[in-house]
Image (cartoon, grey):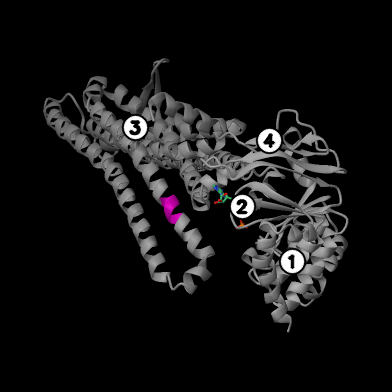
Amino acid sequence: MNLPQSMHELGRLLRYARPYWLVLLAAVVLMALAGLCHAMIALLIRPIFDRVLDPVGSTAPVLLTTIPVFNHPLYLHQIIPFPLQDVWKLVAVGISMVFLLKGLSDYCGNYLVNYAGFSAVTDLRQKIFERVVAQDAFFFESNTTGRLMSSIMNDIDKIQLATSHMLADWMRQTFSALGLLWVVLQMDWKLALVSLTVLPFVFVPTVRIGRKLRRATRRAQDDTADLNQILQETLSGHQVVKSFGAEKLEAARFRKASHRLRSSNLKYVAQQALASPMIEFFGALTIVGLLTYARRQIAAGQLTTGEFTSFVIALLMLYEPVKRLTGIHNIFQQALGASQKVFEYLDRDQLVKDKPGAPAAPVFHSEVEIRNVSFRYPSSETFVLSDVSFPVRAGEMVALVGPSGAGKSTLANLIPRFYDATTGTIVIDGTDVRDVRIDSLRAQIGMVAQDTFLFNDTVANNIRYGRPDSTDEEVRTAATHALADEFIGRMPDGYATVIGERGTKLSGGQRQRIAIARALLKNAPILIMDEATSHLDTESEMLVQRALSNLIAGRTVIVIAHRLSTVRRADKIVVLEQGRVVEVGTHEELVRAGGVYQRLHELQYLEADAFVNSDVE
Ligand code: ATP
């Protein structure tokens, strides 16, 4: 990343702080005050040596410094709001007050900077989350869950650290450095300039280190994302891991990724830890040079011990903020490295999106037409659907059948625009689905997938997922029609029972009936269903079938059929093979025709139904 690009990214990050500019301004003022107090401490050293520790210290007013520009002397008694004659008492009260003021302004400034930083980063995280959830299916195919989670949490944590904690420290150290710089310059500007000639030796390598750190951060972020991915997969697929006895294999995979992360982190630390000793080394060289000079000056009576000690202490105090500032610079580099990925997500253009000013879809009433649809996944060269056309009239039930990989699910996914057809169109009541707002299109379509996804929430909230404003009564009615009310009633807290991650506390049939209740409550006119292929036990199977009948009644249904009973009931069967429509007709017509369907019927449906029937016996 070059300088203009990193400035651009810094600018983008700062834009998130804009709503909090007043808070930031107050923080800057308080931090400036804290920095000034820090510099004052160096000034108070001189009277300690020259007036307090020296037995011949006079009672004359203690001159702290001369304020440049105004050329106005500043005496210690002027900053203490009550009279004190004794120099020691004056210095003691001065030190206490300066520390008190420094502490107070530091505390308040620090809190305010953190307030602005945390708020800005919370806004950024929210924006990224909203952007990510709104992405199309292609996005989720090319970005794994682990990577996304790592970005939304870890990358943003890095930015958070830089923009809240580090920003506070950066302000504090900058103001301290400026204050102390002023102190050393006005004490002895020639000596100060000579002492500061070492600074370029500090800054140039720091900038170089910063660049390397940014790259190291990116690598560490990638490795963290990989580790997250393994963690996420192993935890959510824990049953598969156990059933294949793959615990050791997974542990080895985790160890390998963990070690990669360790080595990336160590590379980072090796770079980052260079800055501090480098600054200390150059600092020590300066002090040695100064001491040689001071010995001569003090011997010649041109410098008092107090003046010299005060100068050296101010200089040493100045090294501290410089050292801290380089550390902070490194953390900022880390944040810039992390923000690269975050901005990539923010900038990604969606492949499936609303046309500008697209109207809402009118309520469905007549026909869904698949018109000359061909489709190819962007990641592959081959078309999985070729010139598919057929109508689905309102109130009809159309079954999609065909061998595995024929393109049935892909076709079903085109209707709610999870993907857009590569060529051809899907038309609902005469309007291309791409010409209406996606949310209004999806509001008309209910979906029941093979694998029901349930959230770790109460049964009631899972059912009302598509219609959060529905009443308890409506939820109960939907559950009753989905034949779920009875088993929900037997659960420990009824509808308020939390059903575990992905609904693991429920049986397969119960999960399906909750999904059916959810679709019933959504009450969409078009229903897309992928019949479950897994065999439930007979009673559960029967209940699911009855619940589905309730769901189907009065709707327009497109079903990816796996059961003889379903295909028999369908008004029309569309047979797909290698992405093409090879046969269309009713069950009887297609069996009589003796083609692909007839073969499938013998192989697939008769076998599957025989299995179910053998269970009944
Ligand atoms: P099944 O009955 O086994 O579920 P299907 O008829 O529903 O199969 P699809 O899932 O639509 O078939 O898949 C059709 C083809 O598209 C397959 O060859 C599959 O490998 C490919 N495919 C599916 N999803 C993707 C994807 N996200 N990216 C690339 N290719 C895909």
Magenta part mainly helix, strand or loop? helix
Which residue is the site of mark 4? 424
Amino acid type indicated by mark 2: Ala
- The image quarter containing residue 507 is bottom right
Residue 58 visible in the current orientation: no
Q: Is mark 2 within 8 Å of ligand 1?
A: yes
User: 541 or 314, which is in the foreground?
Assistant: 541
Instruction: Name the residue located 36 percent from the left edge and 31 percent from the top edge.
Output: 177
Instruction: Name the residue located 23 percent from the left edge and 42 percent from the top edge.
Output: 277
Q: Is residue 533 above or below residue 332?
A: below
Residue 328 horizontal side relative to residue 478, left or right? left
Q: Which mark is residue 43?
A: 3
The label nearer to you, 4 versus 1, is 1
Which residue is the site of mark 2? 406
- How far separated are the C-alphas under marks 3 and 4? 80 Å
What kind of element bears circle 4?
strand
Between discs 2 and 4, the one toward the N terminus = 2
Tell me the quadrant of the picture where the C terminus can be found: bottom right
Range covered by the magenta-colored residues: 224-228
What kind of element bears circle 2?
loop
Amino acid type indicated by mark 4: Gly
Measured from the top left, where is residue 207 in percent x and y? 31, 31
Measured from the top left, where is residue 475 in percent x and y? 83, 62
Circle 3 crowding by C-alpha within 10 Å: few under 14, some 14–19, many from 20:
many
Residue 279 horizontal side relative to residue 232, left or right? left
Residue 340 lies in the magenta stretch: no
Amino acid type indicated by mark 3: Leu
The label nearer to you, 3 versus 4, is 4
Residues tagged 4 and 1 counted as in contact (Cβ below 8 A) = no
- How far separated are the C-alphas under marks 3 and 2? 83 Å
What kind of element bears circle 1?
helix
Tell me the quadrant of the picture where the N terminus can be found: top left
